[in-house]
Image (cartoon, rainbow, N blue to C red):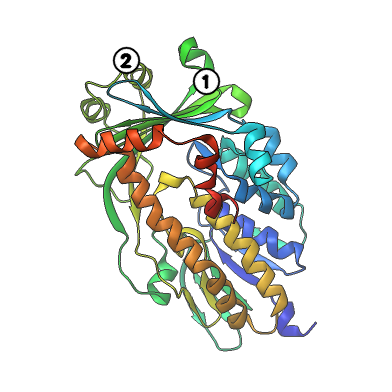
């Protein structure tokens, strides 16, 4: 190994994408320094859905068993009409999903997924984990990279992977497409102890109540001890960031007139966290020299396909494959990585928008949606997801 190849890859961002990148590189024998600006590694959020596609990556990373230990495996994905209460569609999961795609579908707490990745990284001597290190600048020196921290320290490395999220500062220098696109949709999230959920609504399912310009999703977490709620509605309100306290009055106003089951669950929450849903237009090029983007920094998407974290994990495994094959030429590896990833991630970005419109349909479009989905068989529903879960 040359001295250049032995230099660490610098990773900015200690979220799911950053930790997965460090772990995937370590398993290929590549050193990394992961820089997280917060004082500790932690994941803000609640529930997250994990499709069969990401379980293939968990298996490669050696963490599938640990992920499954914390997860819940829903029996069905169900859509109900929030105005009438009718069941629009039911897609069986469980063994049916494994038989169709070779891997399960699960839901878990984001903090549990993040914690599993962090523990796996801590067990790798080739990963240096640093907190309280805010990156304020970076430079491609031609034969390497150098980042500058807020305290003036400079860190040199072989190449740079930016996993710094939707508001990525590195993206400004690499892509330069300005601020993210604000969707006009607001999401509120909360978690309840299972004992506070009415017995009739303690389902081992992922349930989506589709309303006019609203939807509510709920499902169990942490082996069934918690219950995750996510309420989404259209709003003109905007706050940069995604971890602000929500306004329950606005929430209840948007869901007024919907089914009692919806209103009961919403009424159980006294304090909600809210975030503004944003994405970007897909791009084909998120690499510049020895610098590349990953996850939300490269292809932020709305949450309607529940694939944001899954795509970041797919990115990380793909990138590690290419960097191990072209260790002496990071730019070549990064170009190959984005070439393999950009059409898939662009499709998810676009289809997430479509699904959001579908979930929030009103008037005749709502009726057409219900008629179309209620006529599908389970096989037809799974066939429609081959492009996503089979990839």
Q: Residue shown at 31%/25% (left/top)?
A: 82
Q: Nearer the viewer, residue 390 or 285?
A: 390
128 sits left or right of 2 in the view: left
Please tell me in which quadrant of the rendered image residue 375 appears: top left
Residue 199 position, x and y percent, is: 49, 10
Q: Residue most toward the right?
A: 1
Q: Position of residue 211 (x, y in %)?
A: 29, 31
Locate the N terminus by quadrant: bottom right
Q: Quadrant of residue 356?
A: top left
Q: CA distance from mark 1 to mark 2?
A: 16 Å
Number of disc labels: 2
Q: Residue 78 placed where, x, y %? A: 46, 29
Where does residue 325 sit, x and y in percent of width and height?
Answer: 72, 77
When the figure is inspected, residue 299 is found, relative to residue 273, above or below; the finding is below
Compared to 161, does 132 lie above or below?
Answer: above
Residue at mark 2: 260
Left/right placement of residue 350 relative to residue 253 reads right
Q: Residues within 10 Å of mark 1 (few under 14, many from 20)?
A: some
**Residue 235 seen from this side:** yes
* Residue positioned 60% across, 82% down in the render: 332
User: Considering the numbered disc 1 on the image, is that residue within a helix, a strand or a loop?
Assistant: loop
Taking 373 as reference, is 195 left or right? right
Residue furthest to the top = 199
Which of the labelled discs sits on residue 119, or is there none?
Answer: none
Considering only order in the chain, which callout, 2 or 1, is on the residue closer to the N terminus? 1
- In the rendered image, the quadrant that contains the C terminus is bottom right
The crowding category of the residue bearing disc 2, from other C-alpha atoms within 10 Å (few below 14, some 14 to 19, many at least 20), is few
Residue 203 disc label: 1
**Considering the numbered disc 2 on the image, is that residue within a helix, a strand or a loop?**
helix
Tell me if residue 27 comes above or below residue 45 in the rendering.
Answer: below
Seen as rendered, the residue at the extreme bottom is 142
């Amino acid at each position: 190994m040359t001295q250049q190849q032995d230099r660490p890859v610098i990773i900015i961002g200690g979220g799911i994408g950053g930790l997965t990148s460090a772990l995937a590189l370590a398993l290929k024998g590549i050193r990394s320094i992961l820089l997280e600006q917060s004082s500790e590694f932690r994941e803000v959020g609640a529930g997250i859905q994990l499709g069969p596609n990401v379980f293939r990556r968990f298996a490669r990373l050696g963490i599938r068993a640990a992920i499954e230990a914390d997860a819940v495996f829903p029996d069905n994905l169900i859509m109900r009409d929030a105005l009438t209460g009718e069941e629009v569609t039911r897609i069986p999961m469980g063994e049916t999903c494994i038989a169709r795609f070779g891997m399960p579908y699960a839901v878990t707490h984001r903090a549990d997924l993040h914690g599993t990745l962090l523990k796996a990284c801590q067990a790798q001597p080739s990963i240096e984990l640093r907190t309280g290190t805010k990156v304020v600048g970076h430079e491609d020196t031609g034969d390497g990279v150098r980042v500058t921290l807020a305290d003036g320290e400079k860190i040199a490395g072989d190449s740079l992977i930016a996993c710094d999220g939707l508001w990525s500062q590195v993206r400004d220098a690499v892509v330069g497409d300005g601020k993210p696109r604000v969707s006009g949709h607001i999401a509120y999230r909360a978690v309840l102890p299972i004992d506070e959920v009415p017995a009739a609504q303690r389902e081992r399912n992922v349930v989506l109540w589709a309303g006019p310009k609203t939807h509510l999703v709920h499902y169990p977490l942490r082996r069934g001890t918690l219950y995750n709620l996510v309420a989404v509605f259209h709003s003109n309100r905007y706050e940069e960031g995604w971890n602000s306290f929500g306004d329950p009055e606005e929430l209840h106003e948007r869901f007024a007139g919907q089914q009692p089951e919806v209103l009961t669950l919403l009424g159980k929450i006294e304090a909600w966290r809210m975030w503004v849903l944003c994405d970007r237009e897909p791009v084909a090029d998120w690499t510049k020299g020895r610098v590349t983007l990953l996850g939300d920094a490269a292809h932020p998407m709305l949450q309607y396909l529940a694939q944001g974290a899954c795509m970041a994990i797919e990115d990380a495994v793909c990138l590690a494959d290419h960097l191990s094959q072209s260790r002496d030429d990071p730019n070549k590896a990064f170009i190959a990585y984005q070439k393999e990833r950009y059409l898939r991630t662009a499709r998810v970005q676009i289809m997430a928008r479509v699904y959001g419109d579908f979930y929030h349909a009103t008037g005749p479009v709502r009726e057409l949606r219900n008629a179309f989905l209620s006529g599908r068989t389970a096989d037809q529903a799974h066939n429609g997801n081959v492009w996503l879960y089979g990839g």
